[in-house]
Image: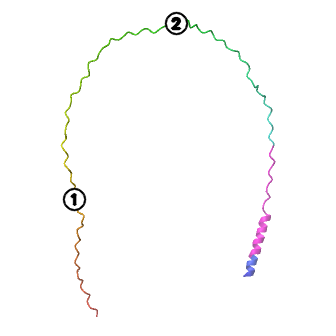
Amino acid sequence: MMALLFSSIHVNKGARNLLQTTQPAIPTIPAIPTIPTLPNLPTLPNSMPNLPTATLPPLPSTSTPLPTNPTLPTLPNTQLPPFPTMPTVPKMTLPPLPSASLPTIPTTIPSIPTIPSIPFPSPPPSN
């Protein structure tokens, strides 16, 4: 039994060594190519060129008076007729509501009558 155990351990170690020696080598990673540098871009001027200033025509003089609004005609003071008053309605009196009396619920539970016991016949004597 011990020899069988020893031989299986020996076979397993040999298989493990065989697996370790037959693994492919890790490929080497090629070198990353260098990125070419960008050409120098022209620099922009810090200030905008001077633009010609526009000349506006002179404003009209304000010495001429502005036209005034024409006066509105005055409306005649017309009186409206008085608003008709509503006739007074007599107050209605309602009769008093009848007092609602709820039926009384009994608080005692009636007793349940006992059922008389029925005598069973005795079994016949066994021989």
Residue 108: in magenta span: no
Please name whichever residue, 66 or 57, is drawn nearer the observer in this view of the structure: 66
The outermost residue toward the bottom is 127
Which of the 4 image quadrants contains residue 60? top right
Q: Indicate the quadrant containing the N terminus: top left, top right, bottom left or bottom right.
A: bottom right
Residue drawn 80% across the image and 46% down it: 32
Q: Position of residue 16 (x, y in %)?
A: 76, 68
Query: Which span is picked out in magenta?
Result: 8-33
Dot 2: few (<14), some (14–19), or many (≥20) neighbours within 10 Å?
few
For mark 1, give the secondary structure: loop
Q: Counting other residues with Cα less than 10 Å from the Cα at mark 1, is it few (<14), some (14-19), or many (20 or more)?
A: few
Task: Give the residue drawn at x 78%, y 62%.
Answer: 23
Q: In the picture shown, does residue 54 fall above or below 29?
A: above
Q: Describe residue 124's horizontal placement relative to residue 2 as left or right.
A: left
Amino acid type at circle 1 is Thr
Q: Which circle's residue, 1 or 2, is located before the other in the chain?
A: 2
Residue occupied by mark 2: 65
Question: Could you tell me how far apart the alpha carbons at marks 1 and 2 are, in whole angstroms?
Answer: 97 Å
Residue at 32%, 13% (x, y): give it: 77
User: Which residue is label 1 attached to?
Assistant: 104
Say which of 83 and 25 sits in front: 83
Residue 125 figure quarter: bottom left
**Image quadrant containing the C terminus:** bottom left
